[in-house]
Amino acid sequence: MPRILPPILAMLCLTLAFAAQAAPPAKDQGSEAPISIEADHMTSFEKSNSVLFTGAVDARQANVRIRTDKMTVYYTPDDKGKKSDKTAAAAGDSQKKKVEKMHCVGNVQISRDDWFGKSREMIYLAQERRVRLIGDAKAWQGQDMVSGDEIIHYIDEERSEVIAGPGERQPGGKTGRVKMTILQK
């Protein structure tokens, strides 16, 4: 067990590192804040460089919170054979793993300040810095709301795209619609 514990702790520390950027931008990113994850069960898969959290998953970092039924975090593999731990530490190299992808399934909810999003599934791709809310996706900023089958948030571009999915046939033969509600002040 002691050999498995360090990789698990490293993953726990990385799991929400993306979350400060996954929700719409805010003044304080909080990426250095402590990370807390609770779930009914956790399994580490060293061969596939992933950790699976199941059962009422509740992950938090600063003002970001993700809740879901199941969360799988994929992280960068160890660089075995490059340098020994002592050599790397002496050279100042970081041995930290990085999140490559996060996949949440079932009752996904992500919130930050007055922004709230929900869907059946969420995929975060770190390299592309893109978050996808998939399946009956909805997002609120205050009381304003947008919905569609999928919401894609491009973090670096600070832009989002809402995609209509297959739905009931609409007049004119179209299927599915994107919906938005804006409350005027």
Image: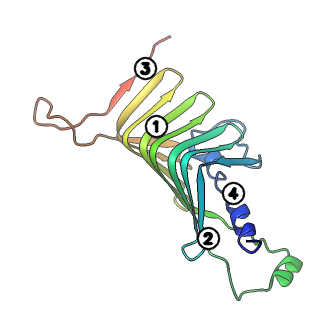
What's the CA distance linking mark 3 and mark 1? 18 Å
Of labels 2 and 3, earlier in sequence is 2
Q: Are marks 3 and 1 in contact (CB under 8 Å)?
A: no
The residue lying at 27 percent from left, 42 percent from top is: 165
Q: Secondary structure at mark 2?
A: loop
- Is there a contact, CB below 8 Å, between mark 1 and mark 4? no
Answer whether labels 4 and 3 touch (C-beta < 8 Å). Answer: no
User: Alpha-carbon distance for marks 4 and 3?
Assistant: 38 Å
- Whole-percent x and y of residue 162? 37, 40
Disc ID at residue 118: 1
User: Can you say which quadrant of the picture contains the N terminus?
Assistant: bottom right
Residue 182, numbered circle = 3
Q: Earlier in the sequence, mark 3 or mark 1?
A: 1
Which mark is first along the chain, 2 or 4? 4
Q: CA distance from mark 1 to mark 2?
A: 27 Å
Q: Taking 182 as reference, is 33 above or below it?
A: below
| Foreground disc of the pair 3, 1 | 1
Identify residue type, mark 3.
Ile
Q: Secondary structure at mark 3?
A: loop
The residue that disc 2 covers is 76
